[in-house]
Image (cartoon, grey):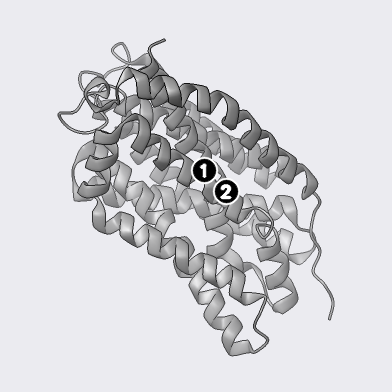
Amino acid sequence: MELTTFWFAVIAFLWTGYFVLEGFDFGVGMLAPVLSRNEAERKQVLGTIGPVWDGNEVWLITAVGAMFAAFPAWYAGLLSTFYLPIALVLVGLIVRGIGLEWRGKVHSSTGRARADLGILIGSFLPAFLWGAIFADLLHGSATAALAGGIFSLSLCVLHGAVFVALKTSGPVRSRARRTAMITSAVALPAAVVALSGIPGASASVSDWAAAPWLWACALAAMAALSAGIALTWRGRDGWAFAATASSIAGTGAALFGALSPAPLPGLTIAEAASGPYTLNVLTWIGLVALPFVLGYQAWSYWVFRKRLVAEVS
């Protein structure tokens, strides 16, 4: 495998990991006001992402850093073309981070309400805008961007609801399951529209015979999403979360597979890549650092694996 192909696959993996992990973070942030009825339940909901949300953001930093080092032309073109929406994504991440950190340090109801609003807005913006950005990158139209944004937003809400059901108990868990089922009425049709358009966005792959693996990824993502909805209805929270995570992973595979010939219009992977020496150095760094980072994050999820209960004040 050429190093350009290897690093494109690594970057696709990092972006997909970011969407899987931050996807439920965004969903929880948007659903906290819906799933909680009092302060104890609000802490229970937000506590599901409290130990992990900032670590999940590292995936975005690593993905963008790898793009900058391995494919500087792709990095420059993507960030300049979508400067405004990406700036809004960063604003959202900053506001959400401030809200999550500040909420535990204020004691007035007004201060907590402002923090909750920041968490809500800061979760909504990236959840919608990332889908819109990549859909626009594939299709180059406002309609596609809107469809992609609705798909990513609804999928994040569904993923977050399933995660809350997995990590909580009591009334919050029941509400999370109901919310997941309600959200599926939007997420599933949005997935059909968005995912069916991904394979055809790549040059000369508008039918199954031309790109069977792209269509397979898109269909697998739709099947996993359907399975997640069915498993939620049956109360199998762990398997449902694995299914929604698999749906996002399948979407990422289809998305970056469609981008692999040309990550930007008129720019191939080879043209966007750094020189051989830079890619060689990056490979050695990645082989040392990436397993350590993955192992540490897996350990942190294992440590905080138990369900949360609402504290009675």
Q: Nearer the viewer, residue 286 or 138?
A: 286
Q: Position of residue 258 (x, y in %)?
A: 31, 26
Q: Quadrant of residue 213?
A: top left
Q: Which residue is mark 2?
A: 56
Q: Which residue is mark 1?
A: 59
Q: Position of residue 143 (x, y in %)?
A: 22, 49
Measure the C-alpha gap from mark 2 to mark 1: 6 Å
- Residue 173 relative to residue 217: left or right: right
Q: Nearer the viewer, residue 288 or 34?
A: 288
Q: Residue at x 39, y 16 (%)?
A: 3
Q: Tell me if I can see residue 215 in this picture.
A: no
Above or below 299: residue 266: above
Rate crowding at label 1 as few (under 14), some (14 to 19) or many (20 or more) other CA atoms within 10 Å: many
Q: Quadrant of residue 182?
A: bottom right
Instruction: Pick out the residue farthest to the left.
Output: 266
Q: Are marks 2 and 1 in contact (CB under 8 Å)?
A: yes
Is the C terminus in the top left, top right, bottom left or bottom right quadrant?
bottom right
Above or below 35: residue 190: above
Q: Residue at x 62, y 37 (%)?
A: 293
Amino acid type for the residue under numbered disc 2: Asn
- Residue 101 relative to residue 124: left or right: right
Q: Tell me if I can see residue 83 in this picture.
A: yes
Q: Nearer the viewer, residue 135 or 277?
A: 277
Q: Position of residue 158 (x, y in %)?
A: 55, 51
Q: Secondary structure at mark 1?
A: helix
